[in-house]
Image (tube, rainbow, N blue to C red):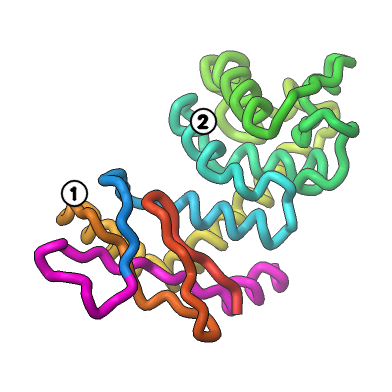
Amino acid sequence: MPKLSKLLSSLTIFFPLILYTTFGATSVSAQTVPNTLKTLDPRVLVLKYYLEGYQAPFQDEAEKFISEADKNGFDWKLLPAISAVESRFGHRFPANSYNAWGYGIHSGKGFFFNSWDSAIGYISQDIKQKYVNQGLITPYAMNTHYSTNPDWGWQVDYYMQELDQYSKDFLNKFGPQISNYNQQVQATQAAELVTGPIFQNQTALKVNSSSLSLVIN
């Protein structure tokens, strides 16, 4: 995955510094936010930038992919991998359908959704009912039920393995920073200020209470 490796090598994540109000913030540019700071699920960052590497139109739905996979009991890498095989990560699918997973094609019916969010939610629940509940939890086990293409299983598995390797590389680079940030959040649950040395070309980047400022050099 040369493109993804190149993107990862040039990626920089700027983590906000969480301060107790008792420390004072008169010497820094601080931003007051509600007490809604939360720890980061590393998988969300991994998936967002993996999908960005493929310019997937649903790259901002990374958190939705993760939450639905967890809720419905299947591997979080499955749906993104299926989209790679079925639509080249959302670059080839019926217009205005938000169906990057070829869902319903096998039965002769093409599903149309009104957003990426609703598509991911519906398909995730359906996968739980039709596959997970039947013990079909790998692409190979799902193959004959999901697609008429006999190579579908290994093709989906290929992208799952690619994403798994990307995740390892990403966490090897950013894992300690993410862990440190999460420890800060947990230790300062009543934090009222978020600030940090997050400058790019002398321009301050805004940080909100639920996300990091992310830039690519």
Span highlighted in magenta in the image: 1-29
* Dot 2: element: helix
| Total tally of numbered discs in the picture | 2
> Are there few (<14), some (14-19), or many (20+) residues within 10 Å of tag 2?
many
Camera sees residue 169: yes
Q: Quadrant of the C terminus?
A: bottom right
Q: Which mark is residue 205?
A: none
The residue indicated by pointer 2 is 68
Is residue 204 found left or right of 81 in the rendered image?
left
Q: Which is nearer the eye, 71 or 153? A: 71
- For badge 2, the amino acid type reads Glu
Rendering coords of residue 166 (x, y %):
56, 62
Check the image and report above or below for 92 versus 114: below
Rendering coords of residue 153 (x, y %):
71, 38
Q: Residue at image x 64%, y 26%?
A: 118
Q: Which is nearer the eye, 13 or 27? A: 27
- For badge 1, the amino acid type reads Gln
The residue indicated by pointer 1 is 189
Contact between marks 1 and 2 (CB within 8 A): the answer is no
Q: Quadrant of the N terminus?
A: bottom right
Camera sees residue 176: no
* Dot 1: element: loop
Q: Residue at image x 46%, y 64%?
A: 206
Check the image and report above or below for 92 versus 113: below
